[in-house]
Amino acid sequence: YTDQPKEDFRTATGYVVAHAEPGDGIVFHSAGTRAPFEYYLAALGAEAGAPHALRPPEPWGMLDLLSPHETRALDDWLTRWRGDRPRVWLVLKYPVALPNGFEREYCRLRARSFSGVHVLLYRKRPRAGEECR
């Protein structure tokens, strides 16, 4: 395991904070993805500029990393989630297929990878099915 690059949550967190707007939401792949993001958020002193955490909803330190609620499949959560944010960030440990329903409601604005951390930004479509601009 010594030749594996370290996940770059520091740069990924700084990127999200630098591009976040008021009203943004953020969805983490799992509780284990939210914890390092929040660690660097605090280290950067950038808590006020962070998007509102949607999944998992509990803050770092209160997360049960083994709870089935916290670790169920992201695509399942996105399928059942009723998008209530104009823009939503996804922070992933590896690329995942997103459900069609989510991609009908939201279109991708940005996608960046930071050594094992994938950050995607989506915005709500003006009307379901309408082409992104």
Image: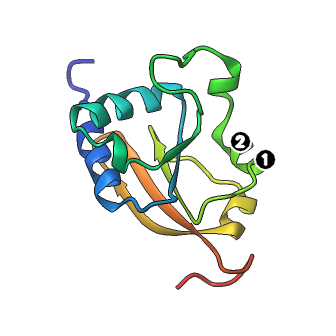
Q: In the rendering, at what x and y percent does residue 91 appear?
A: 46, 45
- Residue 70, above or below 99: above
Q: What residue type is labelled 1?
A: Arg
Q: How many labels does the image show?
A: 2
Q: Circle 1 — which element?
A: helix
Judging depth in this view, the residue of 90 and 93 nearest the camera is 90
Secondary structure of the residue carrying tag 2 is: helix
Image coordinates of residue 114 in percent, x first then y, are 29, 47
Q: Is residue 51 above or below residue 100?
A: above
Q: What residue type is labelled 2?
A: Trp
User: On the rendered image, what quadrant is the N terminus found in?
Assistant: top left
Contact, mark 2 vs mark 1 (Cβ under 8 Å): yes
Q: Mark 1 points at which residue?
A: 80
Q: What is the image's colouring?
A: rainbow
| Residue most extreme to the front | 48
| Image position of 122 with respect to 114: above or below | below
Q: Which of 123 and 58 is in front in this view?
A: 58
Q: Residue at x 29, y 32 (%)?
A: 42
> Residue 40: percent from the left, percent from the top?
28, 33
Q: Is residue 131 left or right of residue 101?
A: left
Can the viewer see residue 8 in this picture? no
Q: Residues within 10 Å of mark 2 (few under 14, many from 20)?
A: some
Q: Is residue 94 visible?
A: yes
Q: Which residue is drawn at 35% across and 52% down?
A: 16
How many residues crowd around disc 1 within 10 Å: few (fewer than 14), some, or many (20 or more)? few
**Residue 34 placement, left or right of 105:** left
Using the image, tell me which numbered label, if any, was put on residue 77.
2
Kindly identify which numbered label has been placed on residue 13.
none
Estimate the spatial distance between the alpha carbons at disc 2 and disc 1, rounded to whole Å.
5 Å
In the image, taking residue 97 as reference, residue 83 lies left or right, namely right
